[in-house]
Amino acid sequence: MKKKPQIKKPVVSGRSKKTKYEPFLDVKNFYVLIGGTLVMGLGFILMIGGYNDDPSFFNEAGLYSTRRTVVSPIVLILGVIIIIWGIFKDFNPTKQSDKADVSA
């Protein structure tokens, strides 16, 4: 008996293959980013104020209070630091056994 000739399968480009999508950031990272955004919002809320009923009177104590000039900028910078940390933090580090398998 004669062998049937094998038919070659057509070459499929890489675009049609389905690859597993792995997001850059984990869900925990997004929670940290939301937390940092809320901390920054708190900093802006602390900065609100200084309303004066009489436009001819300048309320220096209300405008230059410690809450607006010291506490609020510190809270804003803390929020930015939390956001940056949330972007760079890796909550799912690769296991040591996986690294050993790659190098072997």
Image (cartoon, rainbow, N blue to C red):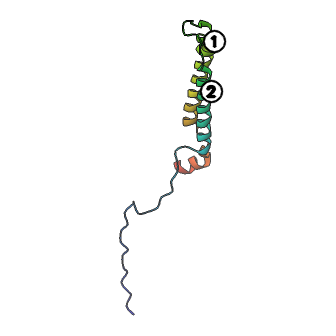
Residue that label 2 marks: 42
Closer to the camera in the image, 103 or 81: 81
Q: Is residue 104 visible?
A: no
Give the percent coordinates (x, y) of residue 44: 58, 24
Closer to the camera in the image, 81 or 19: 81
Secondary structure under tag 1 reads: helix
Secondary structure under tag 2 reads: helix
Instruction: Specify few, some or many for label 1: CA neighbours under 10 Å numbering under 14, 14-19, or 20 or more.
Output: few
Which residue sits at x=60%, y=45%?
A: 27
User: Which amino acid, by three-letter code, is at mark 2?
Assistant: Leu
Closer to the camera in the image, 55 or 98: 55
Query: Is residue 22 placed above or below 29 in the rendered structure?
Result: below
Closer to the camera in the image, 83 or 71: 71
**Which is nearer the N-term, disc 2 or disc 1?**
2
**Quadrant, the N terminus:** bottom left
Query: Is residue 83 placed above or below 50 in the rendered structure?
Result: below
Which quarter of the figure has residue 79? top right
Which residue sits at x=62%, y=40%?
A: 31
Query: Is residue 69 placed above or below 24 in the rendered structure?
Result: above
Instruction: Specify few, some or many for label 2: CA neighbours under 10 Å numbering under 14, 14-19, or 20 or more.
Output: some
Give the percent coordinates (x, y) of residue 72: 60, 19
Give the percent coordinates (x, y) of residue 91: 61, 41
User: Which amino acid, by three-letter code, is at mark 1?
Assistant: Thr
Which quarter of the figure has residue 3? bottom left
Q: Is residue 67 visible?
A: yes
Give the percent coordinates (x, y) of residue 37: 58, 32
Which residue sits at x=62%, y=27%?
A: 42
Q: CA distance from mark 2 to mark 1?
A: 15 Å
Residue that label 1 marks: 66
